[in-house]
Amino acid sequence: MACENITEEKHFVRLFEETLELNRGDISDDDISNAVIEVINSFVGNIACPIEIYQTPERLWAYFFRFSPISAGLTRFHMLEAIENIEEFRTFLKRSSLEVLSIGSGPGSDLIGLCSALYGKADFQKLNLTLVDNNQRWKSLFQAMIQVIRHDEYGNASKLFKEKEINYSFICSDVLNTAAYYEALSNADVVWMKGLLSVLNNNTVRYRAIRVSN
């Protein structure tokens, strides 16, 4: 398992690097490096992620490049733990189709880790991936990442995309007040909230998000 984890993490890194290279346009290495520092500095003393920080292509791709491998790796780890230890969770994977909702994960890199973990451990034939974020600008990165993984070999996640019918969609919502989000939430078999509560602006908003999700 340890060797497989290392191999999958290498695939994650290559996927995200190649997605960046294919879609960066005129953004230079220095632009990415400077934007990574700006993004990291924005977390100092304040773990909230206001949408204003992620408005430029440089910062969006910097976040994607720097944090996507971590996000995918952690998701894979926790998904594998859930599959191994929770009987009720394993029953979901025996369905003919599976609805997965990822909330507040930016470019949706966590869904790559989820797909990696699901490969070879699920009976479903159809997988619907829905990403919800209140920043519309993540949509293009999410779409670019999915297109890249469909057309090359990036480990178990790529194998899942080739063997199953996988659809994806993006909902721009603050998770509190859109009909599209409520519908996706009500239909979801698996809801992934990667760091959502920790990055919301205050406890009142966190409480409201919990109430909606329940």
Image (cartoon, grey):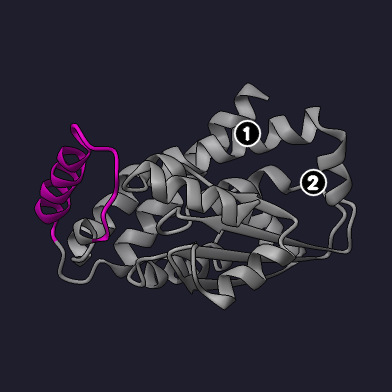
Report x, y in % for residue 55.
21, 65
Task: Report if residue 112 is visible in the image.
Answer: no
Residue plotted at (73% across, 48% down): 119
In the figure, residue 117 lies in which quadrant?
top right
Q: Which residue is mark 2?
A: 120
Q: In the image as oriented, which residue stretches furthest toward the front?
A: 204
Quadrant showing the N terminus: top right
Closer to us: 162 or 71: 71
Residue 136 visible here: yes
Q: Main secondary structure of the magenta part?
A: helix
Residue kind at label 2, given as amino acid type: Gly
Magenta includes 36? yes
Q: Residues within 10 Å of mark 1 (few under 14, many from 20)?
A: some
Classify residue 126 by image quadrant: bottom right
The x, y position of residue 49, in whole percent, is 29, 49
Looking at the image, residue 45 lies above or below residue 203: above
Task: Name the mark nearer the viewer: 2 or 1.
Answer: 1
Vertical position of residue 194 compared to residue 162: above or below: above
The residue under label 1 is 78
Residue located farthest toward the top when viewing the structure as drawn = 2
Q: Is residue 195 left or right of residue 40?
A: right
**Distance between mark 2 and mark 1 Cα atoms:** 16 Å
Q: Residue at x 15, y 70 (%)?
A: 26
Query: Which segment did they paint magenta?
Result: 28-51
Badge 2 crowding class, 10 Å Cα cut-off, few under 14, some 14 to 19, many 20 or more, is few
Question: In the displayed structure, does residue 115 sit left or right of residue 207?
Answer: right
**Quick check: 35 above or below 169?**
above
Taking the magenta stretch, the answer to whether it contains residue 109 is no
**The residue tagged with tag 2: helix, strand or loop?**
loop
